[in-house]
Amino acid sequence: MAELAKHTFGFGGPAAVMVQLMLIAVVGWLLETLAQAAKNGKAAGFIRIVTIFVCIGLVVSEVAKAIGAVAGIAGLK
């Protein structure tokens, strides 16, 4: 079971991006909350937008890798 978890969630594994997304979302939420508490609405909005775009970039990157893997299996690459 530990070997399966290492290959799935380890460095470069297919589920590693989920861990990254969760960490980015938590840190983004925390920074946004701190900025709002400091009465800095512009910074909070900027943090929210950056967090969203970073998460979208990670997802697009992972989808591109998956499409490339499927293309390699199908012999299209």
Image: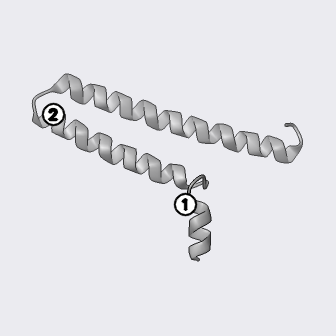
Classify 47 as above or below 5: above
Pointer 2 residue: 36
Q: 77 or 56: which is nearer to us?
A: 77
Classify 76 as above or below 5: above
**Local secondary structure at mark 2:** helix
Residue 31 picture location, percent across and down = 24, 39
Identified by mark 2, the residue type is: Gln
Pointer 1 residue: 9
Q: Are marks 2 and 1 in contact (CB under 8 Å)?
A: no
Q: Is residue 73 left or right of residue 53?
A: right
**Viewer-nearest of discs 2 and 1:** 1
Q: Quadrant of residue 65?
A: top right
Q: Is residue 3 left or right of residue 20?
A: right
Extreme residue toward the right, this view: 75
Q: Quadrant of residue 44?
A: top left
* Coloration of the structure image: one colour
Extreme residue toward the front, this view: 11
Looking at the rendered structure, the number of numbered marks drawn on it comes to 2
**Local secondary structure at mark 1:** helix
Classify 41 as above or below 10: above
Residue 2 picture location, percent across and down = 56, 75
- Quarter in which the N terminus is drawn: bottom right
Extreme residue toward the top, this view: 42
Q: 46 or 7: which is nearer to us?
A: 7
Label whose residue precedes the other's in the sequence (2 or 1): 1
Identified by mark 1, the residue type is: Phe
Which mark is on residue 58? Answer: none
At 57% from the left and 66% from the top, the residue drawn is: 6
Residue 40 picture location, percent across and down = 14, 27
- Neighbour class for label 2 at 10 Å: few (<14), some, many (≥20)? some
At 52% from the left and 49% from the top, the residue drawn is: 17
Q: Is residue 51 left or right of residue 2?
A: left
